[in-house]
Amino acid sequence: NQQILFKSRPEGKPGNDNFQFEDLQEPECQDGEILLEAEYVSVDPYLRGRMRDEKSYIPPFEIGKPLESMVVAKVLNSKNSNFQEGDRVVGMLDWKKKQVHDGKNLRKIDTRLAPAPAFLGVLGLTGLTAYLALEKIGKLKEGETLLVSGAAGAVGSIVGQIGKIKNCKVVGIAGSDEKIAKIKSWGFDDGINYKTTTNMKGAIKELCPNGVDVYFDNVGGEILDASLQNINKFGRIINCGAISIYNETEQPTGPRPEGILIKKSTLMQGFLVRDHVEDFEAAIQQLGSWLKDGKLEYEETIVEGFENIPQAFIDLFDGKNTGKMLVKI
Ligand code: NDP
């Protein structure tokens, strides 16, 4: 057995030296517990925030303690009447190959709905984020223009496709020509490669001639600034993520949004998926039915091997993933 400990807080971009592997005894479960074996581990940009020693909506990782994220695991042994050997569960678990757990806050997954890894992506927190943020804040109306950044990533790929289901015009922003081709293959109307575009404000204007009604922001920074400059009257901006500044050592200042927000009566609202747990079940049903009907496609970048969990996480900041980044154990 093995675990991954948080060795040191990264300065700037995380590196492999921020993680430490440690061998562990084979755990045994006591009454009320289950023995779990990790099958798929989710690596997510928000984990970078937990590596800072800062008060946030979720406690920071502690040095010398195991890291954790959402994991799909198999029940190897159960002394808990709610679980049986062979069940597959999803939940927030330590980065350990095997671990015992009391079963609280673990959800059994139904692999008839979709294969197990999908419960970390399209039917997990990223799919829920896309769907619920659009429902709660985006409130898309037919014919509107939806702009989404991080468009080829886990959240963004689902956001754009929901935009098409809702009969909107959808433009995505992503970091390579291959990713732009990919998002178009999912039905996005068009895309902008932000790495080769010098004038983002102009590029958005050209592809969104009627302006932007809803901007789904996964990246923050200069792309948010350029999107703000194209927002329509009564536009909505969903602040879902800001990966472009997660590794900054000082928070950068940019054009201040107030002027545009007031002039355009824009709603700009932060979104945290964990605030909407009561809506998860209905949202999973909706996403699952779109999957079944072939209206929604999903992509995964699956890295193999427990030893590659840190590198898979680091690679998110270089855009090495298309769709959901996962590690298969
Ligand atoms: P992704 O699958 O989108 O992976 C991250 C992607 O970000 C990379 O593939 C890369 O794509 C892009 N990226 C990396 N660095 C930069 C940069 N400097 N500027 C612009 N893009 C960059 O991750 P998720 O879908 O899991 O998450 C997307 C965002 O949503 C994150 O900011 C995350 O924190 C947030 N989030 C928020 C939640 C909430 O409840 N608020 C829940 C889940 C996610 P590319 O090649 O295009 O650069």
Image (cartoon, helix red, strand yellow):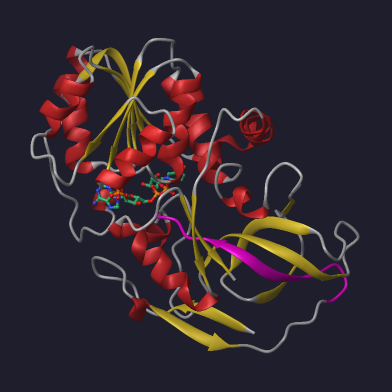
Tally of numbered tags:
0
Task: Please state the horizontal and vertical placement of residue 236, each as a whole percent of the image.
Answer: 34, 21
Report the residue at 41% width, 52% height from top: 56
Between 293 and 160, the residue placed more toward the observer is: 293
Above or below: residue 327 compared with residue 275: below
**In what quadrant of the picture does the N terminus appear?**
bottom right
Residue 29, can we see it? yes
Above or below: residue 201 compared with residue 322: above
Name of the residue lying farthest toward the right: 81
Residue 53, can we see it? no
Q: Is residue 275 left or right of residue 320?
A: right
Between 84 and 199, the residue placed more toward the observer is: 199
Above or below: residue 237 compared with residue 59: above
**In what quadrant of the picture does the C terminus appear?**
bottom right
Task: Please state the horizontal and vertical placement of residue 160, each as a whole percent of the image.
Answer: 42, 30
Q: Is residue 42 left or right of residue 160?
A: right
Q: Is residue 274 left or right of residue 47?
A: right
Report the residue at 45% width, 67% height from top: 61
Task: Please state the horizontal and vertical placement of residue 317, each as a whole percent of the image.
Answer: 31, 58
Task: Please state the horizontal and vertical placement of residue 232, each as a whole percent of the image.
Answer: 24, 14
Q: In the rendered structure, does residue 297 fall within the stretch colored magenta?
A: no
Report the residue at 60% width, 30% height from top: 294
Q: Quadrant of residue 290?
A: top right
Q: In the rendered structure, does residue 38 fall within the stretch colored magenta?
A: yes
Report the residue at 26% width, 66% height from top: 13
Above or below: residue 62 compared with residue 168: below
Residues shaded magenta: 30-45
Q: Quadrant of residue 278?
A: top right
Q: Is residue 105 left or right of residue 250?
A: right
